[in-house]
Amino acid sequence: MKRLAKFVRSWLAATTFNAKAGEVKTTASKLSPGSLPTAIATKFALAIADLPLPQPHQEQLRSQLETALQKWRSDPQNHNHLVILADPTEPLEKYQRWVLDQAAWSPVALFADWNQRPSTYTDIADKLAQAIETISADEGQPQVVVMPSLDQCFLRCADGLAAIDYLREAIAGDRRHFWVLSCNQWAWQYLDSVCHIRAYFQQTFTLPMMDGLAVKQWLSPLEATVEHTFATVEQTQTASKAAPTSSEQPQLWASETEEQYFAALATAAGGISQVAAALWLRSLCYQEASATLDGSPQEDEASVILKKLAFTELPTLTADDRYLLFSLTLHRSMSLAHLARTLGDRIGKVTNQTLPLRRQDLIAIAGSNYQLNPAYYLPLRADLRRNNFIVD
């Protein structure tokens, strides 16, 4: 964590100076804080993606898996699986990688590079069948098998559920191995309504909601790189030049204002990590450096400042917008071709429909895939509930 914070500070210092090179006003007074330059916002977003899993998630997932594995090893007739459930904003692939990093469980990955749905979705069932049959035929020691996320194993269309039907039967019939699955909650609800998936996979673990302290500690490598309108623990410790001794409890909050900010952030985010990170990022502004008398920028004065919590409001949506956003979020992340398939429309029509949603920042693009901007997840979920969509 300390190395990450040091890295973030170093690139932020470089980007802060270069992002506005040649645009500094020839005035000796500081300018009013403004929006983050794109370069800085992008680097913060990348740094958020590189953060480790929140500590409460790691601890509870480890406990759940160890308990489940112990029961299964003592009696193979016990549940031979654990399904990790999360909101559609959460990066389930990071949780899969975290399980794979736990050497004590000797886990193996089924399609370690399967971070998104194969382009030819009708091949999903065949690919899974070949891999599972290879594992099942192995006469060696029982293994902990980490599966691709279930929401990347189907499409909500007439012929898109073959892989899910196969997995239900294959995993239920192979009790020599323990299977770690994952799925977002919208897809889980959908799969249960169409193929009764809960009857096959009864042992689940839902990611816990984060409180203000957990959010603060998770974001701490990035928090160290910004200025605040309130005192922080790091600032007070630096000012006093005194670290807590081994017999002292570490200081959790430097001020009531700091505690209130992160409590409000956690509440506004519904305790969901990626939503909290997105709202935190939207709360940052950029303070340009003032200029010297000769017009050159003062490099050490440019800074990123955390302003008051920024909330998001959902723009007016049409019925077609709602249906598209529901379809996209149900699958968590998908290509434009797959989105068009689920909507039953031509790619050109769907492209035109997504353009205003992208301009309004509701839809983000990661690589070749489209996904919902986490900052809009909670207001979108509330809007869809009011319009009778099944989202939980």
Image (tube, grey):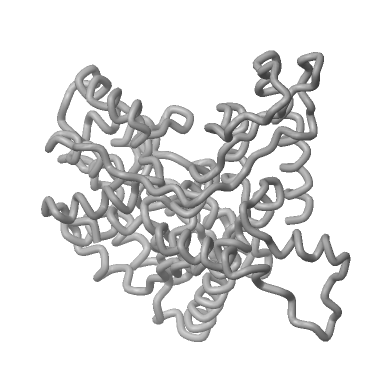
Locate residue 338 relative to residue 129 in the image: left or right.
left
| The quarter of the displayed image where residue 296 is located | top right
Locate residue 300 relative to residue 159 in the image: left or right.
right
Residue 184 visible somewhere in the drawing = yes
Locate residue 216 relative to residue 254 in the image: left or right.
left
Residue 99 visible somewhere in the drawing = no
- Would you place residue 226 above or below residue 344 in this image? below
- Would you place residue 34 above or below residue 255 in this image? above
Seen at 34% across and 36% down, the residue is: 362
Locate residue 71 relative to residue 233 in the image: left or right.
left
| The quarter of the displayed image where residue 346 is located | top left
Q: How many marks?
A: 0
Q: Nearer the viewer, residue 250 or 70?
A: 250
Residue 21: x percent and y percent?
A: 70, 18
Residue 228: x percent and y percent?
A: 64, 51
Seen at 32% across and 68% down, the residue is: 201
Residue 97: x percent and y percent?
A: 58, 54
Quadrant placement of the N terminus: bottom right
Residue 372: x percent and y percent?
A: 36, 41
Q: Nearer the viewer, residue 183 or 75?
A: 183
Quadrant placement of the C terminus: bottom left
Q: Nearer the viewer, residue 216 or 304?
A: 304
- Would you place residue 384 above or below residue 77 in this image? above
Seen at 43% across and 72% down, the residue is: 80
- Would you place residue 91 above or below residue 118 in this image? below
Seen at 40% across and 46% down, the residue is: 375
